[in-house]
Each structure stands twice: as C-alpha cells, then as structure tokens.
Amino acid sequence: DAGITQSPRHKVTETGTPVTLRCHQTENHRYMYWYRQDPGHGLRLIHYSYGVKDTDKGEVSDGYSVSRSKTEDFLLTLESATSSQTSVYFCAIKSRDTANEKLFFGSGTQLSVL
Amino acid sequence: DAKTTQPNSMESNEEEPVHLPCNHSTISGTDYIHWYRQLPSQGPEYVIHGLTSNVNNRMASLAIAEDRKSSTLILHRATLRDAAVYYCILRDRSNFGNEKLTFGTGTRLTIIP
C-alpha cells in the first residue's frame, strides 16, 4: 500500500457544474498523475505534477485543470463538467525520477455527468 | 514515444501457465519494459519490469527477446485471481523527467476454471 487515497470514490453531477477530485498521498512522493479510463481507450494521461506548483499537460488535458499547493495533494478540477467527462479517474504516484521506479495507483473515482 | 502492441484478449485454463505477448518493434535502447495489471474495479498495479535480461519475481517472469522488439509476461500457474487486464508499457530512462506514461488498451486475460 503506497498510501494513496482518492476522493470521492463516486460522484454524480450535472452538466455545467464544477467538480474537483482529490488525490492524497502520505508518502511524500514527488510525482503525481491523473488518468482517465474509458472503454476501448485504456488509460489516458490528463495532467501530471513533478513537484509543488509544477504541473504539465498530458494527452487529454482539455477541459481539466490541476493544482498542487502541497506535496500530499493533487487536485483535478473540471470547471464546467460535460457528459464526455463521464469516466473513471485514477491518480498515480511515483517516488523518484527514474524509469525504474514503480507507479502506484489509487482505487479510482467513478464520475457520472448527467 | 515508442508504442506497444498487445492482443485484445486471451483465455487460459486455471493452474496452467500463461504467456502474454507484447510487441514493441520501435523500442529504443533506453526504454525499460514495464508490465502492470488491473483487476476488476481496481487501479492498475505493478507486476514486473526489465531492460535486457529476463526477470523473475514472486508474481511473474518477464522474457525479453534478444533484439528487444518483443517481450512475454509469463504467469507460471494461473489462478482465478489473475483474471485482469495486463498492460505492457515502455518507459524511457533518458526522458523520465517528462515521462508521459502512456498506457494502451492492454490484454484482457480470462481464466477458465
């Protein structure tokens, strides 16, 4: 267990409302990632962070923003949720900047936008 | 980034070995080969990784072709708990500062009792 928690686990919201998902880690890892998973697409990277206030875009970043004001929390925000953002969202962490390093994933957040 | 190709699905009988293939013909000399699996309703979990030599751990073995253009994840004695989606990904050790960590669609492994 890498000490990674996602909240909420499930959320239903309406189109046009803002939504924030939280990824919390207890291990002081530097690198954190947000992915979405949809049928037929596998895991796709939304945004990632390589330190406090240091973030960058992934392959499907449109419509999403992130913030990392402290090491332990990486927030994913949908400013105005759309039905196409209905998905399962996973957070991942890794401790060091090497390709040898394992990734640890959270249990996921099921988001439904109606 | 170099891409990987995996079969969409495979089936295997319980308590028999399973060989999950992955093709990565455009792999570079600095790419590590990583395998993850995703059990139903869970996030992916690490299985094994390697660079050039075959690797073994308590979960599985990884056989890497001599030219590194393909690899095979071996589950020596599959159980029902091994039913999952298995992902083969490449990680560039020369570019890990900007690692995008992209996953494909993986192989869905079904274990037949």
Image (cartoon, rainbow, N blue to C red):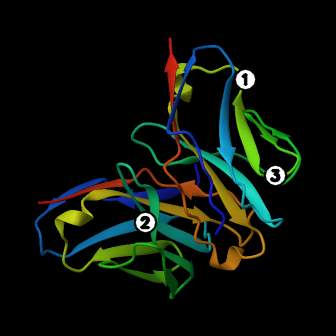
Q: Quadrant of residue A114?
A: bottom left
Q: Which residue is mark 3?
A: B68
Outermost residue on the bottom side: it is A53
SS at badge 3: loop
Residue type pointed to by label 2: Cys
- Quadrant in which the N terminus of chain B appears: bottom right
User: How many numbered marks does the figure carry?
Assistant: 3
Looking at the picture, how far across and down is residue B80, in whole percent?
Answer: 52, 20
A38 vs A22: above or below: above
Residue type pointed to by label 3: Arg
**C-alpha gap between disc 3 and disc 2:** 36 Å
**Residue B59 seen in the figure:** no
Q: Which residue is mark 1?
A: B76
B84 vs A53: above or below: above
Residue in the picture at 67% in, 38% down: B21
Residue in the picture at 53% in, 25% down: B81
Q: Quadrant of residue A17?
A: bottom left
A113 vs B50: above or below: below
Q: Residues within 10 Å of mark 1 (few under 14, many from 20)?
A: some
Between marks 1 and 2 in the image, the one whose residue lies nearer the viewer: 1
Residue A48's label in the rendered image is none
Between marks 1 and 3 in the image, the one whose residue lies nearer the viewer: 3
Left or right? Give the position of B19 relative to A80: right
Q: Which residue is mark 2?
A: A23
